[in-house]
Image: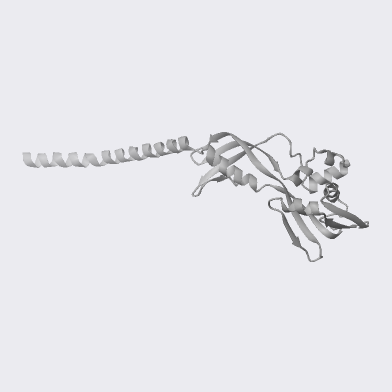
Amino acid sequence: MSELFEQEVEMEKRSSWGPLLLVVLLVGSVLGGIGYYVFQMKKGLSQDEATSVISTMLKSKGTSIHFHVGKVVSDMDEQAKDPHYKLLAKAGYLEVKDLAWNSINVSVTPAGDKEFASVPGFKKWENPDKTTSYEIPLATRELVKVNSITMHGPSSAKVEYEWNWKTTDVGNLFDASSPTVKAFTTWDRSKLIEKYGADFYKGDNKKETVVMVKGDNGWKISAE
């Protein structure tokens, strides 16, 4: 009888370990999850990672000037008498001759050929209307510094940074604060800024904020 009692007691002891073991495993899992969350929060988005992602994003936001060489006739995209031709001619890069009220003849000077070819990213191509299109990069955006990184969970961060323009030599010509651009009429200056890439390139740093998220391939700018 006592032997049977002892067996029952032993079985109860064993059965009591089951729920306790489950509780221990559950607590361990929760603590492990919290530990991982805290670790990720502390690890967060590094300065180097933020710098790399933002620098790549800024490089895609450069600005260029596009114009035609040959007989240029006004259309919906470009007016032959618009001031970008006058500005490039003043710099000695183009020769421009009036043909009619809505057309001009444009040729590139030797100085223009040399200058345009020296600009990284310069492109030109032939068009069906027998003109040649020129595309000259004026400026690229360059990261100055990352001011702060604020984590909003292990995979989301708000980043405050500053950037400024890095101009090419042709871009310097299109600086809206330059004496050459200031010499144009208010109407022509407005057109240069609105349509032809002129900007205040020598101004103060621009401050902006982005949200970055961490995915399978690392950190990136949030699409939202």
Q: In this picture, is 83 found above or below 50?
A: below
Rendering coords of residue 138 (x, y %): 73, 47
Residue 20 in picture, x, y percent from top left: 26, 38
Residue for point 79% across, 40% down: 176
Which quadrant: the C terminus?
top right
Q: Nearer the viewer, residue 187 or 37?
A: 187
Task: Tell how many labels.
Answer: 0
Quadrant housing residue 10:
top left
- Residue 88 picture location, percent across and down: 82, 49
The answer to whether one can see residue 224 in this image is: no
Identify the residue at horizontal 37%, vertical 39% (top origin). Answer: 32
Front residue of 64 and 191: 64
Which of the 4 image quarters holds residue 149?
top right
State the residue at coordinates (86%, 49%): 86
34 over 87 or under it: above or below: above
Left-right relation of 151 to 192: left
Picture quarter with the N terminus = top left
Identify the residue shown where x is 83% and y is 38%.
179
Q: Using residue 195 as the reference point, say whether residue 34 is left or right of it.
A: left
Q: Quadrant of residue 12?
A: top left
Rendered location of residue 67, percent (x, y): 80, 55
Residue 189 in view in this figure: yes
Residue ranking furthest to the bottom: 128
Colour style of the rendered protein structure: one colour
In the visual, does 185 lie left or right of 172? right
Taking the image as shown, residue 161 lies to the left or right of residue 154, namely right
